[in-house]
Amino acid sequence: MQPVTRGALVLVATSLGVVWGAADPGRREADLEDLRDGVDHAHEAGRSEVRPSDDLLVLDLVDGTDDATLDRVEALLGADLAWFDDTTRDEAIAVGRVGDVAAALALIEGAGLPVEVAEAVVEVEALGYPDDPLFGRQWHLPAMHAEAGWWHTPAGKGVIVAVVDTGIRAVEDLDAGRVLPGRSFVAGVVSADDDNGHGTHVAGTIAQTTHNGVGVAGVAPHALLLPVKVLSRFGGGTSVQVAAGIHWAVEQGAQVINLSLGSGRYSALIHHAVKRAHRAGVIVVAAAGNDGGRRVSWPGALPEAIGVAATGPDGSPAPYSNAGKGVDVAAPGGDKRRPGGGVWQDTIDGEGHAYKEFQGTSMATPHVAGAAAALLSTGVLDARGVERVLLAGADEAAWSPELGWGRLDLEAALALTGLADGMERGALGAFFAFVVASVGGLAVRRRLLAAVAGLLAAGGVPVLGTFGGWGGALLSRGVLAWPGLMLGPSWVHVGAWLAGGLAIGLVVLGGGPRWSRAAVLGICAGVGADVVWVLASGLARPWWLPGAWSSTWLALQAVVAIFAALAVAGLDRLDPARGSAHAP
Amino acid sequence: MEWIGTLRYVDLGAGQWVLEQEEGGEMPLVGAVPAHLRDHEVVVQGRRVDALGFGRSMQRSIEVRDIRPA
């Protein structure tokens, strides 16, 4: 982005904020932040609409103009003007609402003031995705690249996320159809309806209804929410309630459990429940705690849970966030010392609802839970794979007590799943297939055919995924991903684990006829290449084999698949019908 | 049991009441708290519990039975 263009856009946003909040400096600052953010998002996404304002004026005064001169301008126009931004104060750009821009321009022209440019403000309106009008306030979603999940995953579709908290209420901006029947474990409370506001806010971060023209957005807006009420309307609960809630969530098929709660005391009961969930293939995400101390609260500190610390709008650790062993990753939790610096979601407000900003590791945790749901919904990884890429995709090179492995980055995690690597995997498959076909002495045309088959087998045609549907999803990925896509996250690694058998089967079925040999050779070589890629990425090591045996097993699959391809080439060499099709 | 301290509101999560004690430390309060006593010295009657919550959580909580000005 050109600095001047960016400055102009920020100016527009700022000017609107100055005028809106003229009567209240605190609110004015908050509005300025909102508008800067909103306009920046719109512009960065290349989706904006501009129109001149009737009564908003912008003045670019001579650089270095002081406050006294601005006061003179204000007196002349009878309007309240303000410098638009401290960081560009030297540029002496001021904005304000003047009632009639044309009249103000006429006054300025004849006054001999040190004005370089004066014109009506051009207002910018964000368009495109998401169209939630308060999305501009949600600095925390771009901060963890939630948009990557919206564009490149099914956004949590079909994934059940249990919110073990104060309950969930389907407020205005939360689609009731995605809130599953819940259960309360609080004595005397029958319903899992939220009577505090915390749980609904947390649920909103995970799966707020998004792009509905209302309110705010969420990380995985197609995920299903399972309300598990374990905290009372005062926000407190016991280890018995929490453990029972976790057990119940697992029984209901939850794939992710969000625990935005904690205690300074270890509970073996909760640990047992979390271990059981972990063994069942559930991702457990828990808050690090809000005491600003050097010890992480339980269950966030449990090794089976992803412990989440909080960061503020500038990405630095939030002052309240606990640090220490047990912190695995950091996510936006907010810092309300900055106006608008909390996490914004829709939640209850008495009998109604309101868009509120909360702060805490409670707010950081659902960003991670939502990201986990988005990744699971791709069908590429199982729970352990998702945990690995979430941590590997975080932005620090080394672990630290404050940030764990770094700040959550969904885009980076997606890249690690291989979703962003389809082209590379396809190229590797094509290369392997071409080499094997060349070694086998196939004619050039058949080598190219084998290379195309290798490319498709390893990487698919990623662009087809954008068309949706089963067919598109399958053809957009390499064949090793097909079991996961067809049968669910538990099957995502089966293709790689059994690649050798797949290749042998292909040779048996299609290696005989000469017309199909090049394609079969290419598919086998492509599958072998893809297993090599999977092995190198470390994403799909068989959990049922200990230590180095898991890598050995995958290497064996790659070798078998490539030998199968060579066998097809050998069959072709022995074929008396080769004739003139021989390679030179 | 009875505790004396200053009633504070902590802006974490959906908000939390704590009893700030002179010797340091904040004990989370679970139960109905009269908001008008915010930042006042109060006497809290109740019992200590190992509660889980979303605000400050490292110290044991007080399950509130009664709060009155000190």
Image (spheres, coloured by chain):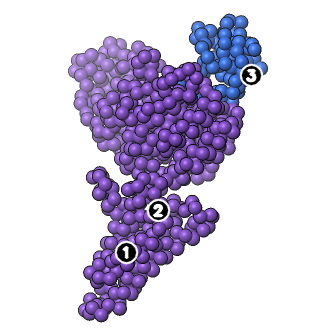
Chain colours: A purple, B blue
Q: Are marks 1 and 3 in contact (CB under 8 Å)?
A: no
Q: Are callouts 1 and 3 both on one chain?
A: no
**For residue B50, above or below residue A466:** above
Q: Nearer the viewer, residue A91 or A39?
A: A39
Q: Which residue was labeled with disc 1?
A: A506
Which corner quadrant holds the N terminus of chain A? top left
Instruction: Please tell me the numbered disc located at residue A494.
Output: 2
Q: Position of residue A3 (x, y in %)?
A: 38, 42
Q: Chain of mark 1?
A: A
Q: CA distance from mark 1 to mark 3?
A: 72 Å
How far across and down, in percent of the image, does residue B42 sit? 69, 10
Residue sitting at 30 percent across and 93 percent down? Answer: A576
Could you tell me if the residues under marks 2 and 3 are in contact, i.e. CB atoms within 8 Å?
A: no
In the rendered structure, which amino acid carries the disc numbered 2? Answer: Val
For disc 3, the chain is B
Q: CA distance from mark 2 to mark 3?
A: 56 Å
Residue at numbered disc 3: B24
Residue at left 67%, top 18%?
B63
Q: Which amino acid, mark 3? A: Gly
Both marks 2 and 3 on one chain: no
